[in-house]
Image: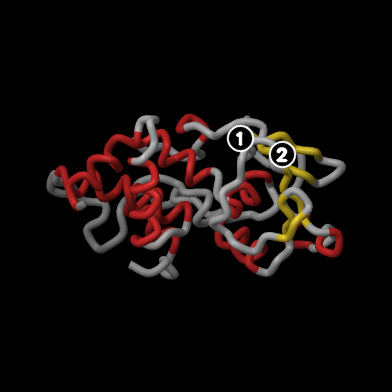
Amino acid sequence: MARYRGPRVKCLRALGVDLPGLTRKSQERRPHPPGEHGQTARRKESEYGIRLKEKQKLALHYGLCEGQMRRYVRDARRSKMAMGDKLIELLERRLDNVVFRAGFAPTMPAARQLVTHGHFLVDGKKVHTPSYRTKVGMVVEPKTKSRDLAALTECFEPSWGLRPNWLEIDQEGKKATVKENPTVSTVPFTFEPQLVVEFYSRVS
């Protein structure tokens, strides 16, 4: 499965949830599933289909292909933490997610592009790998030449509503410090981590 590049709102409608990492748009105007019969009653979803949807929420929000998702699942299984909790911690600690959640980018695709183009420093060193895993105490900031880019300043305002409590934001200095590890409760959309665990236990 390659990274999704199709109609984004269509995905929101199919999954029945807004994914701020995927798009700034909402399914509010058409909250029913896409397709000719989207507004009519549908047959009951299978157990597999329910679990697949939960997995797709994560993959689409964080912009991951199936191979990447499986690697995160494998890493989460090796942890002593509950697998679902560890999986979310690993996904939230990605550098592109920190850039997005801090308010430097409006979506995950935008954050990924900014990181890939070398606009960000981690503890003073340039990192251009979106999947780079940040740790507690690390400071993420745009490099000096990138601080005034419109793409970086558009969302970096005190009113940015997606900042989690595990990030400490220096509004004046344009810095974000990871002050603690993220948890499931800080994910900005509704989902059931246990169903994701069950999905991969069935297909692995």
Quadrant of res 82: top left
* Residue depicted at x 40% and y 59%: 68
114 left or right of 69 in image? right
Q: Residue 106 or 89: which is nearer the viewer?
A: 89
Q: Position of residue 84 (x, y in %)?
A: 36, 36
Quadrant, the N terminus: bottom left
Quadrant of res 159: top right
Residue beneath disc 1: 164
Q: Residues within 10 Å of mark 1 (few under 14, many from 20)?
A: some
> Which numbered disc, 1 or 2, marks the residue closer to the eye?
2
Residue beneath disc 2: 177
Q: Position of residue 117 (x, y in %)?
A: 68, 69
Q: CA distance from mark 1 to mark 2?
A: 11 Å
Q: Is residue 193 above or below residue 33?
A: above
Q: Is residue 50 above or below residue 5?
A: above
Q: Residue 122 or 88: which is nearer the viewer?
A: 122
How many discs appear? 2
Quadrant of res 153: bottom right
Q: Secondary structure at mark 2?
A: strand
Q: Which mark is residue 10?
A: none
Query: Is the image coloured rainbow, by chain, by secondary structure, or in one colour?
Result: secondary structure
Q: Counting residues from the N terminus, which is met first, the one under dot 1 or under dot 2?
A: 1
Q: Residues within 10 Å of mark 2 (few under 14, many from 20)?
A: many
Q: Position of residue 14 (x, y in %)?
A: 32, 54
Asked if the residue under mark 2 is in contact with the one under mark 1, i.e. CB atoms within 8 Å, the reply is no
Residue flagged by tag 1: what amino acid is it? Pro
Residue flagged by tag 2: what amino acid is it? Thr
